[in-house]
Image: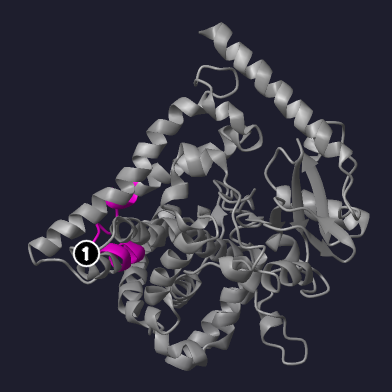
Amino acid sequence: MSFTYFQLFAASLLSVVTYLLLQRRQRPPLPFPPGPKGLPLIGNLRDLPNEPGSWLKYEKLGRDIGSDILHLELFGMHLVVLNSEKASNDLLEKRSSIYSDRPQLKTLAELLDLGSWSLSFFPYGSKWRDWTKALYVHLQPAGVRRYHPVQTKAARQLLSNLLDTPQDFLKHTRQMVGQATLKIAYGFDVDPRDDPNIARTDDALQGISVAQSRGNIFNFVPFLIHFPWWFPGIGFKKDADIYKRKLEQSRDIPYEAVKRALEENRAAPSIAASMITDLSEKSTPEAIFMARGLPHNIYAGGIDTTTAAVQSFVLAMVLYPEVQKRAREEIDSVLGHGHLPEFGDQDALPYLKAILYEVLRWNPLAPLGVPHLLTENDVYNGYFIPAGSMIFFNSWAILHDPTTYPEPSKFKPERFLDPAARAPLPDATFGFGRRICPGRFLALDTVWITIAGMLAAFEFLPAIDADGRPVPPAQEFVFLLAS
């Protein structure tokens, strides 16, 4: 058996080498975008970041070569990084008909089977359009207002939890986001401190993080997916089956619970309940599968990013006490001391909204987003971008461009208030074109009501060491969708 797999490996390797040599002999009609010079066969393998902060390296590479569009090649695969809002708009927005596909990342789409039910990984086509259309019915700007009571209740519960155990604020903020989104998606009233549905999904989502760190080899050497798990370098394949089952359980268990509750006439209003109710005996298998998978997209797709935004806000308040003071003064002057903001107060609290925008700009939730896939050959500014290229938009570089956001490393909400030099809203944090995050309006509302209540109720200070001296907080971020 081992000899058979060795033969298969040798034949596959020979095929890959032959393919790459043929590819290199085919000269493009125009030069590729600028990028570091690669080596034969492996291309820019040595230039790919192998540590956290890859968006920083890509931004520096682009700056060093004087280009806002960066090209790298890896085993014949073309990677293009867009380091400016103009390039991202020109390609991902204005040419969205050919830049809206997704590369089929073997590790996530196939080994974990996310390609069949996670909207982020769907290829651009009829299935993606159908699921996106169904999602927008529930998450369009006017529609998300119906969820304001749910979001307000979860934010108020967070304040109570923080009052009891402020040292557990990381856990409490994640619990708050889970409480709101589970209620919206499935109608569940969750345990305000430790809920099994939240724990189950958190455990399953760890598989995505592990897959990106341990299973990336399958994305660049796809034929290895057919090898057994004990083959050198692909041990993750054994664990992938475990994570796949966990992800399916996190999707199916709440769906089946809502289905039973509807049959027993005790289901609370939710997106899942609405979709199940709309099914009929004539519904297609795809419609039934959509009702099973789409609510989980809302929960799983938002819990990490929304939680990260709230936690980044806390960090900013500790680092910039003057911002915290000004925001609290605005709340007190509008609402009076001791009153918690409501959604109806948003227009009367412009500085608070500016803080929300600055949180999204200062610490982008997905610095390199989820890659797009180019479906046709294209030419941009005299450069040739071949079909099949993976396109990354570097939202960190876009939102830290000093020509657009002066002193970008500083947390300055006032940049969104000055009429003479008002900065553009940080829309890049949610993506570009037809693949822009469909849950952005829900996320914005959740973060706003949360930080509004936290500012009204608490003061954020650094920790104190044994000698009574303040301990500066660490500024270290971990991103699930960083590459």
Residue occupying image coordinates x 52% and y 23%: 235
Q: Considering depth in this image, is 8 or 401 the residue closer to the camera?
A: 8
Q: Nearer the viewer, residue 26 or 351?
A: 26
- What x and y, as percent, mark residue 23? 81, 38
Q: Give percent across and percent down for residue 372.
A: 64, 57
Mark 1 residue type: Lys
Left or right: where does residue 132 sit relative to residue 105? left
Density class for disc 1 (Cα within 10 Å; few <14, some 14-19, many ≥20) is few
Q: x%, y% of residue 173?
A: 42, 60
Q: Is residue 290 magenta?
A: no
Q: Examine the residues drawn in magenta and state their main secondary structure.
A: helix
Lateral position of residue 454 relative to residue 414, left or right: left
Question: Above or below — where is 343 with respect to 62?
Answer: below
Part of the protein shown in magenta: 178-200
Relative to the observer, which residue lies in front, 5 or 230?
A: 5
Is residue 277 toward the left or the right of residue 450 in the image?
Answer: left
**In the displayed structure, would residue 174 be above or below residue 109?**
below
Q: Which residue is mark 1?
A: 282
